[in-house]
Image (cartoon, rainbow, N blue to C red):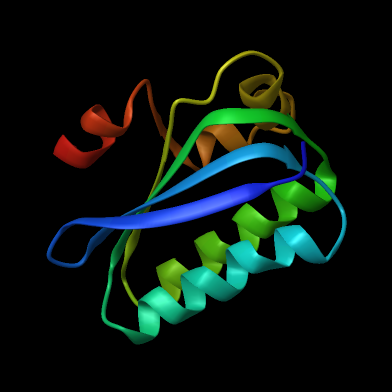
C-alpha cells in the first residue's frame, strides 16, 4: 500500500493529518510538506500527525517531518506526533528525533496536550 493522507480540523486552528501506508522516498511523501504549508497559510497553528496507520518509513519520510517541523516552528506553531509504534517509532528513536518531536500514544492525548 502506498501512502494515504487525509486531514480534519478538530478545533479552531488545530488539525489532525492522518497518514497510512508507507512514507518513503518519492513524490507521494512530498504531499505532507505541501499540506502543512497550505494549513499554515490558512492560519492553522497546531498540527497533529496521526501515525497509527503508518507501516513503514524511510529517511526521506523522516525528512518530510523535519521539514514540516521547521515550517511550523517558523510561525510559532506546535507540531505533535500521535500513535507511532513499533518500527515507525523506533526509526525516530534511533535517530534521537523522539527528543525533538513530541510523541503521544493517541490523537486524543495529543489534542489535549
2 or 32, nearer to the observer? 2
Left or right: residue 93 versus residue 8 is: right
**Left or right side of 17 for 58:** right
Q: Is residue 70 left or right of residue 41?
A: right
Q: Quadrant of residue 50?
A: top left
Residue 10, how many percent across, how many down? 19, 52
Q: Which one is in front, 73 or 40? A: 40
Going by the picture, which residue comes out furthest to the front? 1
Q: Quadrant of the C terminus?
A: top left
In the figure, 65 relative to 54: above or below?
Answer: below
Residue that sits furthest to the bottom in the current view: 41
Residue occupying the point 21% across, 40% down: 111
In the image, residue 77 sits, relative to residue 38, either above or below, namely above
Give the residue at the far top of this rendering. 86
Residue 100 on image: x %, y %: 52, 43
Q: Is residue 75 above or below residue 113?
A: below
Location of the N terminus (image quadrant): top right
Q: Residue at x 82, y 47 (%)?
A: 24
Image spot of residue 4 (x, y percent): 62, 48
Residue drawn at x 22%, y 30% as measured from the top left = 108
Residue at the image point whose x is 65% and y is 67% from the top: 31
Residue 82, quarter of the rendered image = top left
Answer with left or right where residue 14 lies relative to residue 31.
left
Amino acid at each position: 500500500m502506498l501512502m494515504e493522507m487525509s486531514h480534519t480540523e478538530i478545533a479552531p486552528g488545530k488539525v489532525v493529518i492522518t497518514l497510512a501506508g508507507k512514507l518513503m522516498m518519492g513524490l507521494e511523501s512530498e504531499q505532507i510538506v505541501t499540506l502543512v504549508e497550505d494549513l499554515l497559510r490558512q492560519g492553522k497553528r497546531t498540527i497533529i500527525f496521526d501515525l497509527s496507520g503508518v507501516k513503514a518509513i524511510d529517511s526521506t519520510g523522516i525528512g518530510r517531518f523535519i521539514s514540516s517541523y521547521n515550517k511550523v516552528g517558523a510561525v510559532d506553531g506546535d507540531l505533535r506526533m500521535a500513535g507511532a509504534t513499533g518500527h515507525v517509532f523506533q526509526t525516530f528513536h534511533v535517530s534521537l528525533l523522539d527528543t525533538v518531536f513530541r510523541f503521544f500514544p493517541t490523537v486524543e492525548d495529543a489534542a489535549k496536550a
